[in-house]
Structure formats: structure tokens, C-alpha cells
Amino acid sequence: MLGFDIRVAKITWTVFLVAFLLFVTYMISSTLLVVVFSIFFSYLVYPLIQLVERYRPARVSRTASIALVFVLVIVIVSVAGSIFGAQIQDQAIKLSQQIPALLDAKNVSDRIPLPDFMEPLRQRVLDFISSQVQSNADQAMPLARNFGLSVMHAASNLIYLILVPVLSFLLIKEAPSIREELLSWLNHANQRMWSGIIKDMDVLLSKYVRALLLLSIATLISYGIAFSVLGVPYPLLLAGIAAVLEFIPFAGPLAAVAIALAVSAFSGYPHLLWLLGFIFAYRMFQDYVLNPILMSEGVEVSPLLVIIGLLAGDQLGGVVGIFLSVPVIAALKIIFVRASAARREALLMQQREIIQE
């Protein structure tokens, strides 16, 4: 009647609703990013909360034990930052001041060491390097000058360093009630499916975030000690950069290796082969031994999907998109597997009812 089709109206309404939700998500992306980091931080501290809860006296409330853990974590991070942060900051300032001299094309040919077997080709190699440095110097110098501006911009967002722990505290405190409230909106069949999805995603995020933290700490300690022993320039700064980039899957460690080799080469470090050999050995140990052990549960995504997710994440959200790509893909996989299992179970139930009839 009157050309009105209910089915078409439902489809149109669904498309409009999805588009509206995507628009709202885009508009509040910064807020959502803070919430995401708060969730990740919650998974980092939650094992300590579980440990405290195990020995918590009955007269002490759960809120007090959670607050105690957060205070302890903040104190530990502050002490570690005061011990190593000053040295890393000094090395970063020193490197930023020496960048113009390091990129000087007139002297770079004499500073970069080459292995003995490449000495006959030294002039060709160094001419190529000099031409590349000369052509890219105009781009490198503005980046060096803008480094301080980037630091100031990050300092202007220090409010997030306060918001993340606060939101994490509230998320841990109210997580059980939020979960029960969300599940209460669903019927029995969907409750069972989504309860399994939430449980699987809980394992996924806990394993993934804690594995990244342990891998980052292992990289910081290993690189810091090895670079200091080998006499690599700016050892703590390069180790700190590598530890931070460890949180970016695949691309982060490669960028850290490139930065360490580039800074060492342009600084005239004479043992690049030893440095390259250590980095290669460490990456083999971490990628094929330590990483599989730490991520043995929860994060089971094929390399093909990881690469596709990294490329898509880079286009959608840059560094943040790359960081979130692996857990997002793993979460979508969990939802797909659980939904498929629920669908198969429903079909089996229907077949049994037909047979019984």
C-alpha cells in the first residue's frame, strides 16, 4: 500500500544507523583512544590486583585493594622514570644537537665504517651514501628542528597520563557489574554466545598486552646492556626507542633496528657488524622463542591476516592503527568463531527437533 515496503525500510534504517555510529565513532576517536589505552593499562595491572585480592583481609574493601595496587604501580613507574629518564633525556638532547654535524655530507664519508671486504668499493658506496644524505638533508633538518615541538605537544597532553589510570581504576572496579548488565539485555542463547566471546576476548587482551609489556622490558634490558658493552653511542636512548617501538607489531622492531644502525653508522661507530650480529641473534630469539611462549594463548592470527591488518591499520589510523590492528583482528576472529559455533549448534537443535517429530 502506497508503495511502502517494510523490508526496505528496515534495511535503510540499519544502513543509516551503522553510518551514524561510524560517524560518531570518528568524531569521538580521541576519547575512544583514551578508553582503549585505559583498558590495556587495566590488563597490565590486573594480575597484581588478583594477587592482592587473594590475601586481602575481609575487613578491607575491594576498592581499597585496587587503589593500593594503582598507587604501588605509579610509585614504581615514577622511580624507574626518575632513574633512567634523565639519562635518556640527556642522550636525546645530545643527539638532537649533533644531528646537523652527523648529516653533513662533507664529513659523512669519512665517518661511516665499512668492513674490509668492501674497502675496494668504499668510494662508490660512500659516494652513494653522500648523495643520499645530500638529497635528504633538507627533509631531515626540519624533522630534527620539529623534534622539540613534538615533545612540547606531547607535554600538552599530559592530562591523559592522569586520565588513563583513573579510567583504568574505574573500569576494574565496575567491570563485573557492567558485564552482568550487558548480558542481561540478551536472551538465553545470545547470553551464552556473548559470555563466551567476552571470556575469550578477556584472555586475548590479557595475554596480548602483558606479552607486549614483557617483550618491551626484555628489549629495553637486552639492548641497553648490549649497546653499553659494545660501546654503541647513545645506548639508553636507542634501547628506550626500541622498547617503545616494540608495542607496534612487525613494523616497530624493524624501525628500531634501522634507527640503531643509522645512528651508529653516522656517529662513526666502528663495529657495525658486531652490532648487526647481536640484533639479528636477539630478534631470532625473541621472534621464534620468547614471543611464541608469551603469546601462546589468545592471539592466534595467521601471518597473512597480520600483514593485511597492519597495512589497513596504517591507512586508517597511522601508528595507533598499526598498534590496534592485531587485537582487533583477533577479536573479530573470536566473534566469528563463536557465532559460527552458535549457528551450528542451533541448526543441530533444529534437526533433532525435526527428527523427534
Image (cartoon, rainbow, N blue to C red):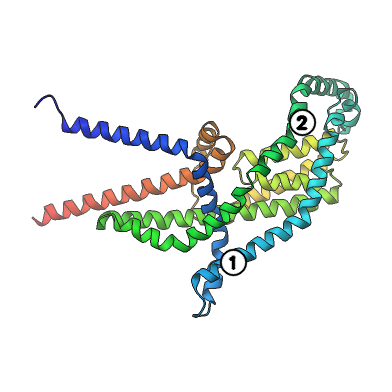
Left or right: where 13 falls relative to 196: left
Secondary structure beneath dot 1 equals helix
Residue 295 seen from this side: no
Q: In which quadrant of the rendered image does the N terminus lie?
A: top left
Q: Residue at x 72, y 51 (%)?
A: 220
Q: Relative to residue 344, is residue 119 drawn left or right?
A: right
**Quadrant where the image shows the C terminus:** bottom left
Residue 146 visible (yes or no): yes
Disc 1: which residue: 69
How many marks on residues? Answer: 2
Above or below 122: residue 250: below
Q: Position of residue 244 (x, y in %)?
A: 67, 46
Residue in the image at 50% along x and 80% along y: 59
Q: Earlier in the sequence, mark 2 or mark 1?
A: 1
**Which amino acid type corresponds to the residue marked 1 in the rendered image?**
Val
Marks 2/1: CA–CA distance: 40 Å
Q: Is residue 248 above or below residue 10?
A: below
Packing grade of label 1 (10 A; few <14, some 14-19, many >=20) is many
Looking at the image, residue 197 sits to the left or right of residue 91; the answer is left
Q: Position of residue 354 (x, y in %)?
A: 12, 52
264, above or below 283, in the image: above
Secondary structure under tag 2 reads helix
- The residue sitting at 47% across, 40% down in the picture is 28
For label 2, count other residues whose C-alpha is less than 10 Å away and answer few (under 14), some (14-19) or many (20+): some
Mark seen at residue 228: none
Dot 2 corresponds to which residue?
A: 145
Q: Amino acid at mark 2?
A: Arg
Kindly indicate whether the residue at mark 1 contacts the one at mark 2 (C-beta within 8 angstroms).
no
Residue 315: horizontal and vertical position, in percent? 53, 31
